[in-house]
Image (cartoon, helix red, strand yellow):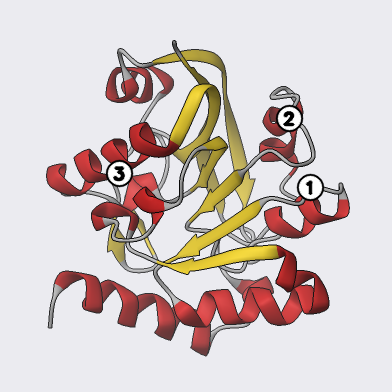
């Protein structure tokens, strides 16, 4: 079984065997991402991609705010199915892609976007080639002056999530990863508490593409 198929199977099983609201990364309101999103001052028809969206509520919040050019991406068809089901008729307003962002076959061909949103995907890419493919895809589709919101487990955060190893970051490591094409606009640490009450220290960052 290929690495992509193994990861797809893992996440399909994770979303298929657990109630979404009990998953360790579930947020009813993604307040910290929305705080950074508001600083981007995007138009309602600007293209926005949610990378590794899973069944998160970020998409719900964008739709409720009237944004109309949304792309939801995940390696797990099961996760996307759950999100579509929750959104109901509004799901037809979103372009859905099943893709592995560490070896993209689809995302890199969608054209330009104004915002790249990633909460808790990059830190799963422990392979250098996977991280480079992620970065190449980001560079390919994000327009000049476009924004990237990236949130990962911080250096004091968990070393594993959902049974998988993690690469932890701080804001300087993320800035080094994205240089020289991106400028760090804002960064802060935030401790998220899972539905079970466990602490999960994150670092949240907002970057703008230079040029």
Give the quadrant of residue 5: bottom left
Q: Which of marks 2 and 3 is in front?
A: 2
Q: Distance between the residues labelled 2 and 3?
A: 23 Å
> Residue shown at 55%/67% (left/top)?
96
Quarter of the picture containing the N terminus is: bottom left
Please name the residue that numbered disc 2 is placed on: 42
Which quadrant of the structure image shows residue 2? bottom left
The Cα–Cα distance between marks 2 and 1, rounded to whole angstroms, is 9 Å
Q: Where is residue 134 in the image (x, y as percent from the top left)?
A: 30, 44
Q: In which quarter of the image is residue 28?
A: bottom right
Sequence-wise first label, 2 or 3: 2
* Within-10-Å neighbours for mark 2: few <14, some 14–19, many 20+: some
Task: Say which element carries label 3.
Answer: helix
Position above or below: 78 against 74: below
Residue drawn at (32%, 82%) of the image = 9
Q: Looking at the image, is mark 3 or mark 1 earlier in the sequence?
A: 1
Q: Do the residues labelled 2 and 1 touch (CB within 8 Å)?
A: yes
In the image: residue 131, left or right of residue 8: left
Kind of element beneath mark 2: loop
- In primary-sequence order, the first of circles 2 and 1 is 2
Q: Decide if residue 10 is on the left or right side of residue 204.
A: left
Q: Residue 67 has which mark? A: 1
- Mark 3 crowdedness (10 Å alpha carbons): few <14, some 14-19, many ≥20: many
Quarter of the picture holding the C terminus: top left
Whether 170 is drawn above or below 124: the answer is above
The residue that label 3 is drawn on is 134
- Please say if 123 is above or below 148: below
- Neighbour class for label 1 at 10 Å: few (<14), some, many (≥20)? some
């Amino acid at each position: 079984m290929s690495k992509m198929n193994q990861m797809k199977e893992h996440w399909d099983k994770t979303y298929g065997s657990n109630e979404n609201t009990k998953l360790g990364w579930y947020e009813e309101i993604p307040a910290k991402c929305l705080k950074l999103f508001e600083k981007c001052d995007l138009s309602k028809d600007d293209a926005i991609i949610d990378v590794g969206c899973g069944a998160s509520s970020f998409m719900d919040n964008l739709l409720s705010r009237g944004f109309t050019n949304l792309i939801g991406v995940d390696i797990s068809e099961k996760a996307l199915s759950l999100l579509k089901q929750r959104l109901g008729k509004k799901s037809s307003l979103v372009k859905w892609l099943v893709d592995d962002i560490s070896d993209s076959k689809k995302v890199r061909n969608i054209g330009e976007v104004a915002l790249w949103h990633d909460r808790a995907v990059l830190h799963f890419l422990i392979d250098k080639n996977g991280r480079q493919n992620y970065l190449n895809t980001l560079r390919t589709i994000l327009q000049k002056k476009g924004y990237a919101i990236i949130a990962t487990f911080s250096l004091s955060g968990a070393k594993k999530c959902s049974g998988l190893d993690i690469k932890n970051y701080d804001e300087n490591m993320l800035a080094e990863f994205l240089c020289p094409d991106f400028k760090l606009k804002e960064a802060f640490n935030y401790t998220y508490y899972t539905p079970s009450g466990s602490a999960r220290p994150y670092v949240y960052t907002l970057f703008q593409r230079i040029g």
